[in-house]
Amino acid sequence: MSFDPLQKQLALLAGFLCGDALGRPFNGLKGGHVQQLAGGEVEGWLDNTVLLPEKPDRNCLAGVHSVLGQEFLATLAGLHPDETGRDSIAMWAAFIKDLHGIDDPSGTVTSAIRRPGKPLLRALDRWAMEYPWEAADHFAPSEVSEGASCCNRALAAFTNDAVDCIGIARLTHLKEAPLTCAFIVSRAARMLADLNDAKKINIRAFVAGLHDHTREFEDELRNSDIAELWKENGFGYPGARVSEALSVLPSLIESGDDVLAERTLVKQAHEFEPDRAVTHAQHGFAPVMIPWVLYRVLGPASTPIAVLDAVNRGGETSLAASLIGGLAGVRYGFDSIPAEWIEGLLVWPEARALLENPSASTIESWLATERRLTANEESFRAPLREAARKATLNSAPKRKKTKKSSTEKIEDQGELPFAPPPQVWLEEKGDELAPWEKQRLKSERGRKRIEWKEDRRRQKRDEESADN
């Protein structure tokens, strides 16, 4: 290797975790909303972490990473062999299952996992039913998701050549686009680490090399056993190749026009026929997210500027900022990451120990820290939940008094200055006729009155005719 492995790996780890933790509070929000809540451009850790008091579970403690960081660290922990003899991919699944917890007798779930996505949730359900696993039970047999979340594990696999970056991505994803993007991220990290000068980079040569490696991978993937699973599930091949989606990057980077780059990549992503409309570059859809990440990493922006740009743009801020932070860290080195960011990471001591010495004791310390951080966030959210509950009760409209039923009996109130309601004068009293008899007589009187009027009109016409 032409680089210091440990320093590059530390830079990858720090950049990834910092980007993840910085972007986590704004995940899923629009760029304008991000700046509105933060009181301007996000420039680092926020002093006020209660951004959405009306949504208690959306608020999180500063410096706490998301489930993406947990998966990344579980990959590092899986590099430590244990007495079971399981490979690193199976151990990753075991650590995630351990963090997820089990159902206790009270019906609650003890979980340190922080808002897992649908593919991971489905994997956890599958592993819970099939534990202990056979070798093939880890992998997603029919996952339809084309999100880029599996790329975080593939990026972590850069820290050890023995880890199969596609195998670890297949734990939750199966389709061609996310698996190809996982390969791209892992390969890009290796190529960035091999750079002699991070600031002087031949973008066209870099992208051309990445394109060729990716095209070769796609061809191998389409001739593998995984392609048979695509046929069984009716997936088939996508209409476009991710390798070709990389071809526009050199021109976009040279233009330096972020608006043009976003529009181009979003339009290009629709060639992959996404299930949902892709409207911005930091959408979770892998064919747009990964080219955008490379556009930011290969551009001229420094590590902190690129990460903060991802946070302030909104969208999948945690995923975009973590991938950009990790790859930019590999390119520019550990010193490119602000020291105050690293100091603000609440899991940094355990994370660094996992990378440098993934022993049984460091793994257990990391797992304990994950549970503690999740418990601290639950304690932080508890008063917010109570305040939101009280606000809901106070703002609920008061119940209106119900009107008395029209069939309800009303007592005779004697002489009234206004006409009494129908249920009073229609009520049968003593020897009086029943209401229906009164109605029949009234109708008969009305009919006789009409006949009388008709007789008068006929008599008048006859008299007028006689006079003429």
Image: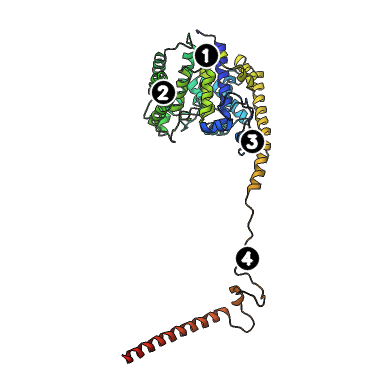
Residue tagged 3: 109
Give the class, few, some or many, for how many residues have Cα within 10 Å of label 2's Cα (few <14, many ≥20): some
Q: Nearer the viewer, mark 4 or mark 3?
A: 4
Give the class, few, some or many, for how many residues have Cα within 10 Å of label 3's Cα (few <14, many ≥20): few
Q: Amino acid at mark 2?
A: Leu
The reply to whether residue 316 is visible in this rendering is: yes
Q: Quadrant of the C terminus?
A: bottom left
Q: Amino acid at mark 1?
A: Tyr
Residue tagged 2: 221
Which of 420/108 is in front? 420
Q: Which mark is residue 332?
A: 1
Disc 1 from disc 3: Cα separation: 42 Å
Compared across the picture, whether 110 is left or right of 332 comes to right
Q: Nearer the viewer, mark 2 or mark 4?
A: 4
Image position of 323 with respect to 117: above or below: above
Question: What residue do we see at 64% from left, 82% from top?
Answer: 430
Q: Nearer the viewer, mark 2 or mark 1?
A: 1
Q: Which mark is residue 404?
A: 4
Question: Percent x, y for residue 48?
Answer: 64, 30
Q: Which element carries disc 1, helix, strand or loop?
A: helix
Evaluate if marks 4 and 1 touch, with contact meaning CB atoms under 8 Å apart. no
Evaluate if marks 2 and 4 touch, with contact meaning CB atoms under 8 Å apart. no
Disc 2 from disc 1: Cα separation: 32 Å
